[in-house]
Image: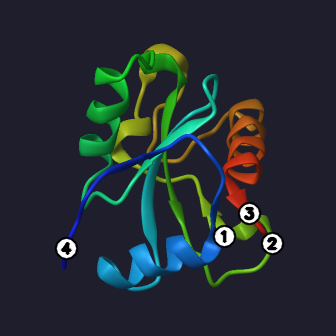
């Protein structure tokens, strides 16, 4: 497996994510997304590494969430709201899953903006 973190600021494709998945986990890409800046870090073995890259590039912690993308899955179920970086009691998120439907919708909107044919 080879991992290299990339910050996505312009639309990419599912095909590019599928290639990333093939280079890493096979069917899934770990992603950390900044829902306010509409950017995402992709390509790491751990969400925490992507989170650190976004924080170093000006993101605020409260806007950064970890997800997994499954490029071969059709519909919004290709987005999995699960990551250790999402455990945030101070933001009323006490589990790995993102519990706030508003944050989930922001993530879905950002993914649609950043991934062509999402």
Q: Is residue 49 above or below residue 82?
A: above
| First in sequence: mark 4 vs mark 3 | 4
Q: Are marks 1 and 4 in contact (CB under 8 Å)?
A: no
Residue 102 vs residue 99: left or right?
Answer: right
Q: For the residue labelled by badge 1, is the local secondary structure a helix, a strand or a loop? A: helix
Measure the alpha-carbon separation of dots 1 and 3: 14 Å
Q: Are marks 4 and 3 in contact (CB under 8 Å)?
A: no
Q: Residue at x 64, y 22 (%)?
A: 36
Residue 100 vs residue 53: left or right?
Answer: right
Q: For the residue labelled by badge 2, is the local secondary structure a helix, a strand or a loop? A: loop
Query: Which image quarter holds the C terminus?
Result: bottom right
User: Residue 47: x and y, percent?
Assistant: 33, 48
Badge 1, how many Cα within 10 Å: few under 14, some, many 20+? some
* Residue 43 figure quarter: bottom left
Is 55 or 8 nearer to us in this picture?
8
Badge 3, how many Cα within 10 Å: few under 14, some, many 20+? some
Q: Are marks 1 and 2 in contact (CB under 8 Å)?
A: yes
Choose mark 3 or mark 2, whichever is in front.
Answer: 3
User: Residue 41: x and y, percent?
Assistant: 42, 45
Q: Residue at x 73, y 35 (%)?
A: 106
User: Residue 87: x and y, percent?
Assistant: 40, 34
| First in sequence: mark 3 vs mark 2 | 2
Measure the alpha-carbon separation of dots 4 and 3: 24 Å
Choose mark 1 or mark 3, whichever is in front.
Answer: 3
Image mark for residue 75: 2
Dot 3 corresponds to which residue? 116
User: Residue 96: x and y, percent?
Assistant: 44, 46
Residue 46 vs residue 12: left or right?
Answer: left
């Amino acid at each position: 497996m080879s991992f290299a973190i990339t910050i996505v600021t312009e639309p990419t494709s599912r095909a590019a994510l599928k290639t990333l998945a093939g280079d890493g986990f096979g069917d899934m890409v770990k992603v950390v997304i900044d829902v306010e800046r509409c950017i995402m870090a992709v390509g790491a073995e751990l969400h925490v590494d992507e989170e650190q890259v976004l924080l170093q590039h000006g993101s605020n912690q409260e806007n950064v969430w970890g997800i997994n993308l499954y490029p071969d899955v059709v519909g919004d179920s290709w987005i999995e709201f699960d990551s250790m970086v999402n455990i945030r009691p101070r933001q009323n998120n006490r589990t790995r899953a993102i519990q706030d439907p508003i944050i989930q919708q922001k993530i879905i909107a950002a993914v649609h903006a950043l991934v062509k044919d999402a």
